[in-house]
Image (tube, rainbow, N blue to C red):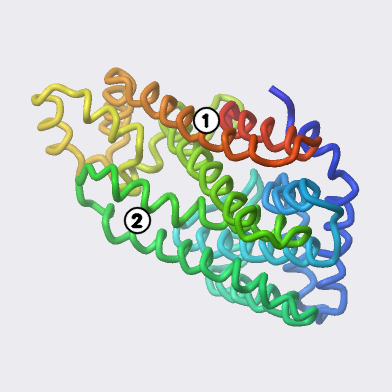
Amino acid sequence: MKSFKEISKNIKLDLENFEVLLNELFIDEDESLKEFFDFIFKIKGKRVRPALVYLFARMFGETNSTSHDAALLVELIHTATLLHDDVIDEAVLRRGVVSVNKKWDNKTAILLGDYLLAKSMQVTTKHQEYKLFDIITPSVLALSLGELEQQISNFKNFEINEEKYFKIIKNKTASLLSACCKAGAYSTVKDEIILEKAHEFGENLGIIFQIKDDILDYVGNEKTGKEKGIDIKEGKITLPLIRAFQNMSESNRNQLKVVWQQAFDDAEIRKNIIELTIKNNGIKSAEQDMQIYRNRALNILNEFPKCSARDALEELIDYVIERDK
């Protein structure tokens, strides 16, 4: 499997320029705020979302000011949602480093998230990129709705509902990735059919991304040492368990229903549920689902011009599927 660095080599300069532009956004901030933003953006991830913007922009032309604004917009929104999520999840770590809410407090993390959302609006209004608002706003609404639906529907309720699961992950994960792809394409092409295809690709990639996250929560990773069964602990019924439940005997199903509410506070029960899920092919079945969405994403890419950006996007799909964290 190629590393993300190898996959994104053709947009290396774009991503380097992105970091400069991101830092410039906060260069004139009050000294009292700089400490927060230096900390937040120093712990950067792989920049998958800006990379999607630039890859789709380069599929149809050369990156430009609209491409950069789109990349900044999606990264600011993404970072804001992470700050809020860490408060909700009572997280102590983010990318292996102490989280903002733990280093300071919940109020600070929430307010910083709000500030980044406002900053994202400033980026687009400054250059009158109102079409980017049209592309991104529905994804932010969907993302919020997905998180709300998951909180309401899954908390301490044992409900196997495949349709609801896919609706939630399309909203909470796939929506922003699809907006990245569409915004990137929009920056260099205005064909509505292409823009919708870019959106559709991003949705499929986002679904793959979330299914993989849900699988990793059951199989873990020795490198990261991350605790398994966090989704179970939080009352989330994800695809591995849904698929396993479909394969279980009636006695195992009844047993699972009985112990589910005890699993939130009992590590041994969570361990048993994980073992039951694996035994009943929940992981293998979820992996098969990822392949279905992989094929859908590849079929969409095949409609686009053959180029290095398209090749990178193909490799990115497999990177998402094969990653171990």
User: Quadrant of the image for the C terminus?
Assistant: top right
Q: Please determine whether, in this image, residue 226 is positioned above or below residue 93.
A: above
Q: Could you tell me residue 201's position as x and y percent?
A: 57, 45
Q: Could you tell me residue 89's position as x and y percent?
A: 45, 56
Q: Earlier in the sequence, mark 1 or mark 2?
A: 2
Pointers 1 and 2 in contact (CB under 8 A)? no
Q: Nearer the viewer, residue 135 or 153?
A: 135
Q: Nearer the viewer, residue 141 or 94?
A: 141
Q: Dot 1 corresponds to which residue?
A: 295
Q: Could you tell me residue 136's position as x and y percent?
A: 60, 67
Q: How many marks?
A: 2
Left or right of 86? Residue 269 is left
Label 1 sits on a secondary structure element that is helix
Task: Please state which amino acid type lies under the numbered disc 1.
Answer: Asn
Q: Could you tell me residue 178's position as x and y percent?
A: 57, 53
Q: Dot 2 corresponds to which residue?
A: 150
Task: Please state which amino acid type lies under the numbered disc 2.
Answer: Gln
User: Quadrant of the image for the N terminus?
Assistant: top right
> Of tags 1 and 2, which is closer to the observer?
1
Query: What residue is shown at x 74% (from left), y 40% (from top)?
Result: 305
